[in-house]
Each structure stands twice: as structure tokens, then as C-alpha cells.
């Protein structure tokens, strides 16, 4: 039972990190709705006790901006 729980927690964390890393902002959507979606993703990261240092967060946000 303990092993199953640990696997489920690890899978949830993996899904959350992938969601954070795969997030992309696009010019075809309203920017504020995309910012809110990204903030919810970051909140999800924090609630699962996943630590992403501030520098990595800044780099990730800049990388997620659309080219336009």
C-alpha cells in the first residue's frame, strides 16, 4: 500500500512538472488569461512541495513568452 501511494505521488509530481515545463504562451490568446493559467500551474507546483528556485522560474517565464 505504501509503495502504491509513493508511486501515485511521484506520478502527480511528474505530471505537474511536465505541465509547468510544457506551458507555452501564444499570441492568439488573451495574455491575462494565459498569465492566470500559468499562475495556477505554479500554485499547483507549490502545493505539491516541488521546489523551483527563483532564477529557474524567471528563465522559464521568459522562455514561455510568445515570440511576438
Image (cartoon, rainbow, N blue to C red):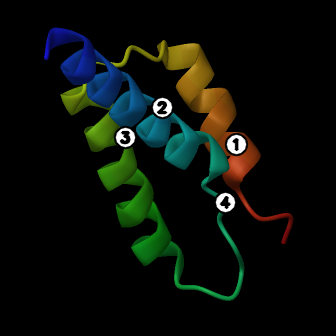
The quadrant of the rendering that contains the C terminus is: bottom right
Point 66% across, 60% down: residue: 24
Residue 14 image label: 2
Q: Is residue 7 above or below residue 35?
A: above
7 relative position to 55: left or right = left
Sooner in the amino-acid sequence: mark 1 or mark 4: 4
Point 70% across, 42% down: residue: 62
Q: Nearer the viewer, mark 3 or mark 2?
A: 2
Sooner in the amino-acid sequence: mark 3 or mark 4: 4
Check disc 1 and report its element: helix, strand or loop: helix
Residue 53 image label: none
Residue position for label 4: 24
Check disc 3 and report its element: helix, strand or loop: helix
Residue position for label 1: 62
16 relative position to 64: left or right = left
Q: Is residue 21 above or below residue 4?
A: below
Amino acid at each position: 500500500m505504501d509503495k502504491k501511494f509513493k508511486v501515485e505521488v511521484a506520478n502527480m509530481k511528474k505530471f505537474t512538472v511536465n505541465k509547468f515545463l510544457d506551458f507555452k504562451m501564444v499570441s492568439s490568446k488573451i495574455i491575462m488569461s494565459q498569465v492566470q493559467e500559468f499562475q495556477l500551474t505554479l500554485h499547483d507546483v507549490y502545493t505539491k512541495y516541488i521546489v523551483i528556485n527563483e532564477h529557474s522560474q524567471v528563465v522559464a517565464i521568459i522562455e514561455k513568452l510568445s515570440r511576438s
